[in-house]
Image (cartoon, coloured by chain):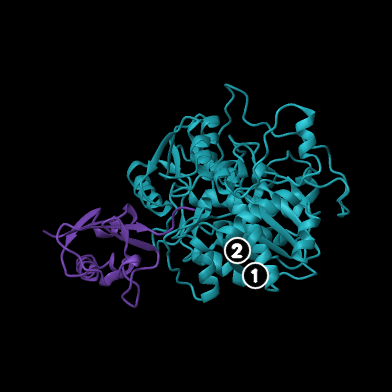
Chain colours: A cyan, B purple
Amino acid sequence: MRGEEKDDPMPVIAPPPAPSLAPATPAAGARRVPPRPLPLVCKLCGTPHRPAASATCEECLGPLEPAYRPDRALPDARTIAARPYSLWRYREWLPFDGDPAVSLDSGFTPLLEAPALAARLGVARVWVKNDAVSHPSLSFKDRVVASALNAALGLGLDTVGCASTGNLANAVAAQAARAGLPAWIFIPHDLELGKVVGTAVYGPKLVRVRGTYDDVNRLCAQAADRYGWGLVNINLRGYYGEGSKTMAFEIAEQLGWRLPSAVVAPMAGGSLLTKLEKGFREFAEAGLVEGASPRLYGAQANGCAPIVRLVERGGDVLEPVLPKTIARSIAIGNPADGRFAAAAIRRSGGWAAGVSEEALVAGIRLLAETTGVFTETAGGVTLAAALALAERGRLGPGDEVVLCITGNGLKTVEALQGSLPEAPIIAPRITELETLHGRDL
Amino acid sequence: MAVTFSLPTVLARLADGQATLEAGGATLGDVVAEIATRYPRLAPRLRDEAGGPYPFVTYYLNDEDIRFRQGFGTPVAAGDQVVVVAAIAGG
């Protein structure tokens, strides 16, 4: 199974039939028929809605979610294991009738064990869920965009887009380009260069907005209302968010169809935490895994930690903040799912932690030095938060912990400027190397 | 001159289809109260039972989230622009 280390002693299920690799896109000129998006239902009041580019309940303005048929046929572990290595191997838990038409190869990223981190945290075992190498744009946003673009096509929308802190911009731009869909992408004006270039290169209509992500988000809410575009995290949000569940599904499968005791994930809008909870629950309800659901732990930078503060404070009223952190990808001061993420964390028996800028940079370096995974700032926040939680006794010696690493460090190299030793420059002479030999560089 | 009050489509249908309204008052709360009186079906989606902002909308006064000011107690002046946005968006 891809994602396991060769010498991993994990129990392995009976060998499935050999899966095939997922094609990235259908052959040219052979575009598939788009899948039919499922109807929607309000998460709060239960009002049903027809399939639509709408994320808000017309009755109570609560969030809409796909309504799955409870009597649908579900696959067993062997059937899933035989399918192509992509998030679509879990298609019965994704919000469509019919096969996906685009973004066929996203998902199924590696899960690698990190014994050095387990020792550092003082827990039994640690794994890194490595979405830093997600296809095609190197972040977990590939998962949600794969779902949202199929919804856009199924709803007959001809333009897509998003409000983004960077990773989502990359994912929408890349996947829309492959799908042949025009894309309007809105980002804060001062994002990291890697995030901007990693969007612009795909040729979308890229707009930089003076203000924070929350300002961008407000503009996009109005734009979706006015122009009818499929803005993936605005009016396609009900379909988009379901893609995040596949991270939970993959963790369970890659551990040998079982659950870890704790999962640590970064929080921006808060949706990922809620979808991890939902994904683990759905696999348990399907009989694919047994035992207690993992305790969920949320991580934010102290410079933008409204969900951490809500978990600490209790209640369900989130107080927005003005972000001030280098962890730009999770710098959302007014997170839409903040109250739901806090509730999911509390239900699971988990907690949340905020970390300093220095700690998150140290987290990036520690992850790289112990696992060979180079993560962006959000990943540094995740590892730093895990260290803080372990120090406070929230993670213990019996725990098996998964760290959700959601993005790639090459996108945020600015964060490491000044924190790494400067490499010496020498002439190509062995005598000059002799002067360095034996020195601590 | 009054305060301009913009609604998303999902709320405009509760205000006889009007996406832009005008109202007056000394505070944002006054403006909301006037609109709520004019459009009773819209009222419960603007204010909660305690009279505060309904939790699934966000109010912006001249582009600033009112939670960074004084909420419904924020003073308003003629020509100000209030934008109401459904809160479930983004991330």
Find residue A350 and name its label: 1
Q: How many marks?
A: 2
Give the quarter of the image for residue A100. top right
> Under tag 1, what secondary structure?
loop
Q: Position of residue A346 (x, y in %)?
A: 60, 72
Q: Residue at x 56, y 39 (%)?
A: A35
Estimate how packed mark 1 is, as few (under 14), some (14 to 19) or many (20 or more) residues with alpha carbons within 10 Å. Answer: many
Q: Residue at x 82, y 37 (%)?
A: A18
Q: Is residue A11 left or right of residue B31?
A: right
Decide if residue B4 is in sight here: yes
Tell me whether the residue at label 2 lies in contact with that at label 1, contact meaning CB atoms closer than 8 angstroms: yes
Q: Which residue does the numbered mark 2 point to in the structure image?
A: A298
Q: Amino acid at mark 1?
A: Gly
Give the quarter of the image for residue A360. bottom right
Pointer 1 chain? A
Pointer 2 chain? A
Near-viewer residue (A194 or A59) = A194
Give the quarter of the image for residue A424. top right
> Under tag 2, what secondary structure?
strand
Specify which label sits upstream in the sequence, 2 or 1: 2
A275 shown above or below A193: below
Near-viewer residue (A292 or A315) = A315
Q: Position of residue A281 (x, y in %)?
A: 67, 62
